[in-house]
Amino acid sequence: MKRVVNISKNAEEAQQWDIKQHLSMGVEERQAAARVLKERVYGKNSLDARKAERNK
């Protein structure tokens, strides 16, 4: 995942850049980014929430 840095002058500008960034990414890119962030926070052996709910 390529890191992108943006320095905004205020919160409104930062929010607009964030929205533009999300819209410019494809579905696969967003899913890959979410997967990388999930692994960083919960580790590679974390349960998939959808599978955990099905087992209840």
Image (cartoon, helix red, strand yellow):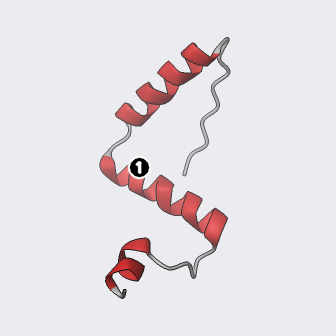
**Count of picture labels:** 1
Q: Residues within 10 Å of mark 1 (few under 14, many from 20)?
A: some
* Residue at image coords 54%, 52%: 1
| Quarter residue 36 falls in | bottom right
Q: Is residue 40 above or below residue 15?
A: below
For numbered disc 1, what is the local secondary structure?
helix
Q: Looking at the image, which is closer to me, 2 or 10?
A: 10
Q: Amino acid at mark 1?
A: Arg
* Residue at image coords 31%, 49%: 27
| Location of residue 38 in the rendering, given as x and y in whole percent from the top left corner | 56, 63
Q: Is residue 35 above or below residue 53?
A: above
Residue denoted by label 1: 30
Q: Looking at the image, which is closer to me, 14 or 28?
A: 14
Quadrant location, the C terminus: bottom left
* Residue at image coords 58%, 58%: 37
Asked if residue 34 lies left or right of residue 55, the reply is: right
| Location of residue 19 in the rendering, given as x and y in whole percent from the top left corner | 44, 28
| Location of residue 42 in the rendering, given as x and y in whole percent from the top left corner | 63, 70
Q: Is residue 49 above or below residue 34?
A: below
